[in-house]
Image (spheres, rainbow, N blue to C red):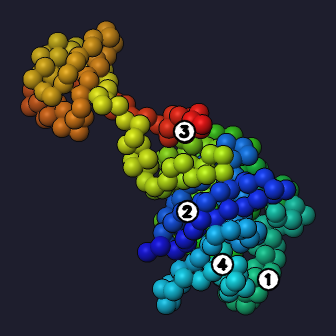
Amino acid sequence: MELIQIKEVTKEYNKAKILQNVNLQIAEGDLFGIIGQSGSGKTTLLNLIAGFIEPDEGEITYISKIDGQPKNLHNNFHKIKKHLGFNAQHTSFYPKLTVKENLLHFGQLYGLKKDTLIENAKNLLQITGLFEHRNKLASQLSGGMQKRLDISCSLIHKPKILFLDEPTSDLDPIMQKEIISLIQDVNKQGLTVVISSHNLESLERICNKVAIIHQGEVRSMGEIEEIRKPFLKKEININIKTGKDKERIIQLARKLAVTKIVDKDDHLVLFTQDPELVLSQLLKVVQQENLYLHDIDLRKPSLNEIFTKITQQK
């Protein structure tokens, strides 16, 4: 079910168009990534969808789960905002409050009843791994734990949609993985997540849909495999590390729908227009003859490669 509809949205600052005729659909349960170069308009788009700024043209509507009717975000923001959680790139918690005190403070700002607030805080401390640190000052936490606290403050009122702006920036690779895992966990619990990030490798791994913004326009949007299709070559490379059974595997591969085989000593490269069929048949005969393969890699363009090609276009 669609949760958010963005129709023909345009936004200007000082007569310069930051976004132009943007159309997007975000469904309930999506983990939706927004990517773009600095200055492309992706943060502006995130702020528009979260209701912080209004479009100059176009409309952003939210679909009610109760009656299925679209409601204009900015005309009904006082009703919709309680269902939204926003986590900015820079921390918003209070460093001189403890972890628990921060959660209680933000919960009170949302007007939660005391019993509900305590229960929500208790659950979040468990989910985010902050329970052991609940009585520490926020300033005493590591960078990764501070980010967990920041996200927790955005979740204290149990929103239906969570907006994240560059949630892994300034974190080391280990901490990035921890935050990405946390985002996946909250999404699996039914929360719709919209995330703006430069970390394309992580977005490719966790998002079911992405939108690529370039020069204020949506250049591509949808499931990653759909976005990838226009960039697939007519022939796809299958790289195989074969070991001692290489010659026999070459003989078997010649009987498959392979247009060319290149022997690169440490591995073989098979060229084919039907990679799924070739992989299936090859694995079947390899198993039948009890041969050994070290590794198989089906080479498709990565999200980073697709993004680079799109942003190089005029």
Foreground residue, 270 or 144?
270
**Location of residue 262 in the rendering, given as x and y in whole percent from the top left corner:** 27, 13
Assess whether mark 1 and mark 2 are in contact (beta carbons under 8 angstroms). Answer: no
| Viewport quadrant of the C terminus | top right
* Dot placed on the residue nearer the N-terminal end, 4 or 2: 2
For the residue labelled by badge 2, is the local secondary structure a helix, a strand or a loop? Answer: strand
Q: Which mark is residue 92?
A: none
Q: Residues within 10 Å of mark 2 (few under 14, many from 20)?
A: some
| Viewport quadrant of the N terminus | bottom left
Cα separation, mark 1 vs mark 3, equals 45 Å
Assess whether mark 1 and mark 4 are in contact (beta carbons under 8 angstroms). Answer: no
Image height of 103 relative to 32, above or below = below
For the residue labelled by badge 4, is the local secondary structure a helix, a strand or a loop? Answer: loop
Q: Residues within 10 Å of mark 1 (few under 14, many from 20)?
A: some
Cα separation, mark 2 vs mark 1, equals 36 Å
The residue indicated by pointer 1 is 108
For the residue labelled by badge 1, is the local secondary structure a helix, a strand or a loop? Answer: helix
For the residue labelled by badge 3, is the local secondary structure a helix, a strand or a loop? Answer: helix
The amino acid type found where label 1 is placed reads Gln
Q: Residue furthest top?
A: 265
Using residue 100 as the reference point, say whether residue 222 is left or right of it: left
The amino acid type found where label 2 is placed reads Asn
| Residue drawn at x 63%, y 80% as measured from the top left | 72
Using residue 282 as the reference point, say whether residue 25 is left or right of it: right
Foreground mark, 1 or 3?
Answer: 3
Foreground residue, 72 or 114?
72
* Dot placed on the residue nearer the N-terminal end, 1 or 3: 1
Q: Which mark is residue 23?
A: 2
